Structure formats: structure tokens, C-alpha cells
Image (cartoon, rainbow, N blue to C red):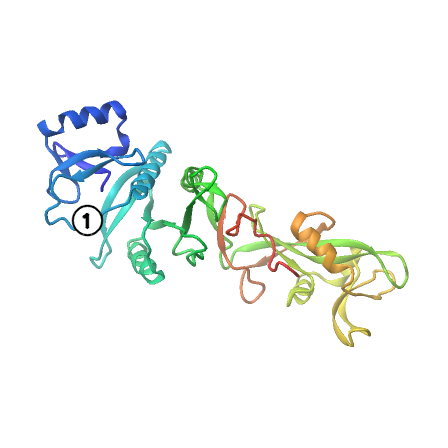
Amino acid sequence: MPLRAKLNSKDVYAYEFNENSWNELKATYKKQTLMMSCCDNKAIPKVSKLNNYFFAHARRGLCTSAPETFEHIFLKTLIAKIASSLGWNVMTEKVGETPEGDRWIADVFCTKEKTKIAFEIQWSSQTEIEFKRRQEKYIRSGIRTAWLYKLRHNQEYFPTNYETPAFGIQYKKDSNEMHVPQFNQTIDDFVRGMLSGKLKWKPHDGEELTGQLITYVQQCWKCKRNTRVILGIGFYDKDRTELELAGFHEDGIPEFILQQISNSALAKNGIGSIKNRYHKTMGEAYISNGCRHCEAIQGTSYYFDAWVEYAYTGSLGEPMMEFLFENSQETFHIEGKWYYGRKSFDRAGNQFRRRNVIP
């Protein structure tokens, strides 16, 4: 059920009509030549159950275009209207080919200068293999694509990545409005934000990132004097988007800190040295925080409550000492994910801020 048809050999789009002009078309289309864009069959202007305008086949004949749900029509209309309002050139049901001649049809195709974005709406079930097969055509055609698919009850997210941006849509029970729970956005705001540059993949491999030590002042168990210890690291990109928080006692974090900052630099900022120390109670040695005054090992008794409170609320810990590093397997690697604005969310709408729920 396309939004595009040919009226007297000229493309017309259903989403561009208002109530008066649509009623006028319905009253006069039989006296004109209104044809489907997907085939040579005559078209009929209709209104969906969700109050969207579309064109239907007067007689389907041999046309192979697939039927669409009313939700599919609604989303195509919404995307096309928003894109047009933001200055994008829009074509619905755009037909194209890969360099090898493989055909694709984009639900909504948007262009602005050199940027090309194809929106695909998937309201029926589709396997991960089929997502990737269809996406591969767009990749070979040099076109960025955004998939909007129906997220069914308790369904896991499609494993989206940079090459295949796919975002689930659900109805909110209280308002019965479509929203994107992955980013806690209404579908209107999400599409508008996406076309305005709010949706970004961060960080990329090889990108220069900033690490920022998060510290905490506690009383040394041995000398009873206050000492500053390291709780962990906050990781940021050049836009100061918080990508992750990593606790000091996570695997590899103490070693990474030592690679980036010397103990003499820590001392200048009032932070005790970090080095391999033997813990009598645990009966083992590990890289630990030490008292800046007496060098006594600062165990984990302070750490868990302080870190959990900082990771969830941002309180207690004090950011200090920044350093730059390359996001790579050779230094320290942060996996990329999609961010809307400067935040990334999980399915429940909670912001991703930490590597693990419990350090």
C-alpha cells in the first residue's frame, strides 16, 4: 500500500495531502489518470484505520508488491512528513539496485546534499539472517539505513551494530503511542532526532578518548590519616559523552592506569601509589591503592559501597586527572553502541554508565 502514485504521469505523495485536497482527489481521480507507482494498475486513494492516506490497487493483477499493515503505513507517513519538514528530499517506495544489479525498495528514501538514508519498517517477523541479507544490499549501494521493527513482548533486541542500525518499537500501554524503549523516546522525537544528527555510534575503533580518574577520600586504617584512593575511571569522547565507567578492581583497570599515569604524578595530586601489595587476610598479592602517608594497603572494604553509589548516582567520587588514549585492543577497548544525544539506554530506559551492575 504505497504512499506514492502517478497522477497524470506526475509523482504525487499521499502524506503531502491535507483533508480537503485528499477529499478533492477522491472525488475527481476517476476523471484523471491515477496509477500505482509499483505497477501499471489504476490506483484508488484511501484512508487507513490509523487515519493515514495511501494508494491502493483498483485491481491488483500481477503486481508483486507486498501488502502492508496500517502501522507500516503510519510509520512511513510519519517519517516522510518529518523528513520533509527538516529539509530532506523524500521519496517513498524508492526502487534501487546494487552495483551488481540486486534490487532493493526503500520504504522511505531521504537525501540531503551527499547524505542518503533509507528507512525500512519491519512490522512482521524477520530473522537476523534476513535483516543482514537485505542490509547488505544497502551497504553495497553506499546507502546508510535505519531499520524500525516491531518489538514484541519480552523479545530481545535485534543485535544492532554500526553496519545494521535496527531499533525496536513498542506501544506504550498508558498512552497507546509508539515509542523506542531503547532510547526512551517517542517515535516522533526519535525520527526527528535521528534526521537532525542526534543518533550517533560511539566510540569508533582508533578514536582518541579521554580517561578521567574518579577518586575518593577515606581514613587509612593504619595511620588514621585521610588519604585519596582511586575508585575507577570514567571514559569520554571528544564531545564529553560519558561512554563507560570502569571500577578500579575490574580486570585490567589497575594495569591500564599504571600505563597511563605514573605514581609520582598521582602523588602530586594527593593520591596514594598503586602497586602490587600483599594482603594478609586474603593471603595474596594484587595491585592495590595505598595510603599516601604510610603506604599501607587500602583494601576493598571502602570500595564497593562507594563505587556503587558513584556508578549509580554520580555522588561521593571526585573526578581528577585526565589522560588521552586510543580506543584499541592494544591499549584499552570500549565497544561501540548507538547513542541518542549524549546517552545510551538499555531496554528498561536506564542509562548505560557502567561496565558491570555490581563491580
Q: Please say whether residue 204 is visible from this viewpoint.
A: yes
* Place of residue 243 in the rendered image (x, y in percent of width and height, measured from the top left): 57, 52
Q: Is disc 1 placed on a helix, strand or loop?
A: loop
State left or right for residue 81 relative to residue 270: left
Q: Nearer the viewer, residue 269 or 197?
A: 197
Q: Nearer the viewer, residue 221 or 170?
A: 170
Furthest toward the bottom, the residue is: 283
Residue drawn at 20 percent across, 57 percent down: 101
Residue labelled with disc 1: 65
Residue drawn at 14 percent across, 48 percent down: 63
* Place of residue 62 in the rendered image (x, y in percent of width and height, measured from the top left): 11, 50
State left or right for residue 66 relative to residue 281: left
Furthest toward the right, the residue is: 223
State left or right for residue 110 relative to residue 54: right
Q: Please say whether residue 265 is visible from this viewpoint.
A: no
- Which quadrant would residue 323 be assigned to in this image? bottom right
Count residues near mark 1 (Cα–Cα under 10 Å), then give few for <14, some for 14-19, many for 20+: few
Residue drawn at 19 percent across, 49 percent down: 65
- Which quadrant would residue 130 be assigned to in this image? bottom left
* Place of residue 180 in the rendered image (x, y in percent of width and height, measured from the top left): 45, 45
Q: Quadrant of the C terminus?
A: bottom right
- Which quadrant would residue 33 be assigned to in this image? top left
Number of marks in picture: 1
Q: Quadrant of the N terminus?
A: top left
Q: Amino acid at mark 1?
A: Ser
* Place of residue 112 in the rendered image (x, y in percent of width and height, measured from the top left): 34, 39
Q: Nearer the viewer, residue 8 or 76?
A: 76
